[in-house]
Amino acid sequence: MQRVKQAQQGDEAAFLSLLNKEQDKLYRMIFAYVQNESDAIEVYQQVIIVAFEKIVQLKEPLYFSTWLMRIAINQSITYVKKRDRERAVSPESLHLIEADYRPIEEQLDLWQALQFLPNHYKTALLLRFYHDYTVPQIAEVIELPIGTVKTHIRRGLKMLRQHLKGVYNDEWAKSAEKDDE
């Protein structure tokens, strides 16, 4: 907590030491959204800049990690939305996409399936199962009530199961739902 206060007073070394503790967790979360190493690095750099510029606004130093993760999630979502808007498919290339169609069982895995979920479900699932956050911790990060987080996890798991259509064993998802009740 002392380092956070030092960082808020402009101590770059304190900020970097705080960041070193969080960098792996942040990068993994960012990568889960952008699905590309160079994009993840770019977003990570944006997160560092935003965090450094806004650390003085952090009201409770105890929640530095949560605050930083929220910045990473928001920056990732913004980046993906912007990137997706910029990716326009020309009408000439549409036949190439259709020609490469393969059944879902052949082309999807869990990470690809996550990309089809709405961001609020994806965020809840990633924090819960990829970063091992508890439901109350997730509620704190995404600033929603605990009941809403539980709903997002359940609905996200349901959508994953529907999307994967039995390609993967449902035992893991069902046991995960029981853990959250």
Image (cartoon, rainbow, N blue to C red):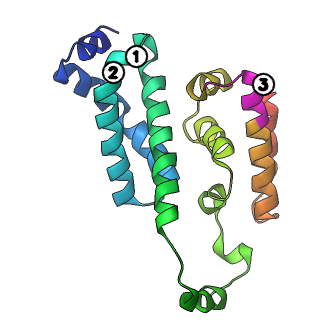
Say which quadrant the C terminus sits in.
top right
Mark 3 vs mark 1: give the one in front: 1
Say which quadrant the N terminus sits in.
top left
Mark number, residue 147: 3
The residue type indicated by label 2 comes to: Ile
Element at label 1: loop
Which of the two labelled residues, at mark 2 and mark 3, occupies the earlier sequence position? 2
Q: Circle 2 sits on which residue?
A: 55
The residue type indicated by label 1 comes to: Leu
How many angstroms separate mark 1 from mark 2 (CA)?
5 Å
Magenta segment: 143-151
Element at label 2: helix
Q: Circle 1 sits on which residue?
A: 58
The answer to whether residue 169 is left or right of residue 26 is right
Inspect the magenta stretch and tell me whether residue 119 lies in it. no
**Residue 93: quarter of image:** bottom right
Element at label 3: helix
Which x, y percent locates residue 124? 65, 38
Give the residue displayed 59% in from the left and 29% down from the top.
142
Q: Residues within 10 Å of mark 3 (few under 14, many from 20)?
A: few
How many angstroms separate mark 2 from mark 3 (CA)?
29 Å
Give the residue displayed 31% in from the left and 36% down from the top.
48
Give the residue displayed 72% in from the left and 22% down from the top.
146
